[in-house]
């Protein structure tokens, strides 16, 4: 079998975790995507997180910053779908976001420190850091500060390789991941871009689009010791694919 030209730089520039126990918590249980939402529970809400905790599953959540740099748990860049309020999340000050309710609930938008206090180490937590451009430093710093003193199993991850790189340089004890999709990134250029992102990110794990599995890139990284999670698993067929080609799932299905 011909050796990939990317094999050596992958090994040198993005080595796998030095200790397997560092990332062992990632494969121990499924992760509920944005909490166990549905059936009256909205995504990234306290109710969805409580449901995941009660089920004993890990939680995947999203964070982004208010205009004044406070970290909230919220997925969309636009507020409308989840709150009914118009406008971009990042253009609103924290005081206004604190007073904004999740749609059809009596819950205000949660801050990251509130979610950390709610989870309290009872289940593993994946924090996806959402950035609209490559400038990730201020938000990464705010997330790191929120995690100071937190004792539970936790990891950060992002599509933006600069997030994982920032944590590798400034908070190396925090497990970090690179989120990957191959959508619209086919051919040699797509392959090259994935490897460049890997080298830049230096991740402890990958979170891979289930639609792309099986993937030669994901398989090569997994074979050399980088765990692969996969998102978003919604069907039995997707779960079977994940069982063959990944170490754990990030899934969506309502709790009973």
Image: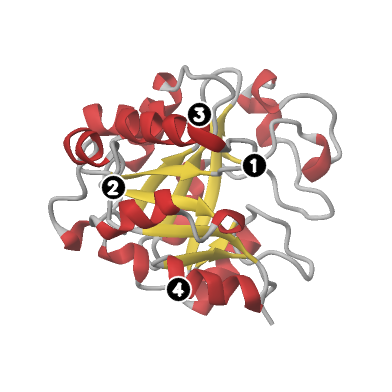
Image quarter of the N terminus: bottom left
Secondary structure beneath dot 1 equals loop
If you read the primary sequence from the N terminus, does the residue marked by circle 4 or circle 3 appear first? Answer: 3
Front: mark 1 or 2: 2
Residue at far front of view: 1
Give me the residue at 23% from left, 55% from top: 224
Query: Residue 249 at x, y = what percent?
Result: 50, 66
* Mark seen at residue 244: 4
Query: Circle 1: is it few (<14), some (14-19), or many (20+) Cα within 10 Å?
Result: some
- From the top left corner, tell me how far across and down residue 186 is, in percent: 58, 38
**Badge number at residue 75:** 1
Nearer to us: label 4 or label 3 = 3
Earlier-in-chain disc, 3 versus 2: 3
Q: What percent of the width, then of the height, locates residue 243?
A: 47, 75
Residue in the picture at 34% in, 33% down = 201
Q: CA distance from mark 1 to mark 2?
A: 23 Å
- Measured Cα–Cα span from mark 4 to mark 2: 20 Å
Tell me whether circle 1 and circle 4 mark residues in contact (CB < 8 Å): no
Residue 189: which numbered mark, if any?
3
């Amino acid at each position: 079998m011909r050796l990939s030209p990317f094999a050596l730089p992958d090994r040198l520039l993005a080595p796998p975790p030095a200790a397997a126990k560092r990332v062992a918590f990632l494969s121990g249980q499924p992760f509920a995507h944005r909490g166990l939402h549905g059936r009256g529970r909205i995504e990234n809400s306290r109710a969805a997180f409580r449901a995941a905790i009660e089920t004993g599953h890990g939680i995947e959540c999203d964070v982004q910053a208010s205009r004044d740099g406070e970290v909230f748990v919220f997925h969309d860049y636009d507020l409308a779908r989840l709150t009914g309020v118009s406008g971009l999340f990042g253009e609103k000050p924290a005081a206004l976001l604190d007073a904004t309710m999740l749609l059809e609930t009596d819950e205000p938008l949660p801050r990251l420190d509130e979610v950390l206090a709610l989870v309290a180490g009872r289940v593993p937590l994946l924090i996806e850091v959402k950035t609209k451009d490559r400038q990730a430093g201020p938000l990464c710093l705010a997330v790191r500060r929120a995690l100071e003193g937190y004792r539970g199993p936790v990891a950060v991850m992002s599509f933006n390789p600069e997030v994982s790189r920032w944590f590798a340089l400034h908070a190396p004890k925090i497990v970090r991941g690179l989120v990957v999709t191959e959508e619209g990134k086919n051919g040699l250029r797509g392959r090259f871009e994935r490897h460049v992102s890997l080298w830049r990110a230096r991740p402890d794990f990958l979170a891979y689009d289930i639609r792309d599995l099986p993937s030669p890139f994901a398989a090569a990284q997994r074979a050399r010791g980088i765990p692969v999670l996969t998102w978003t698993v919604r069907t039995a067929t997707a779960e079977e694919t994940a069982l063959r080609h990944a170490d754990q799932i990030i899934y969506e299905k309502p709790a009973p």
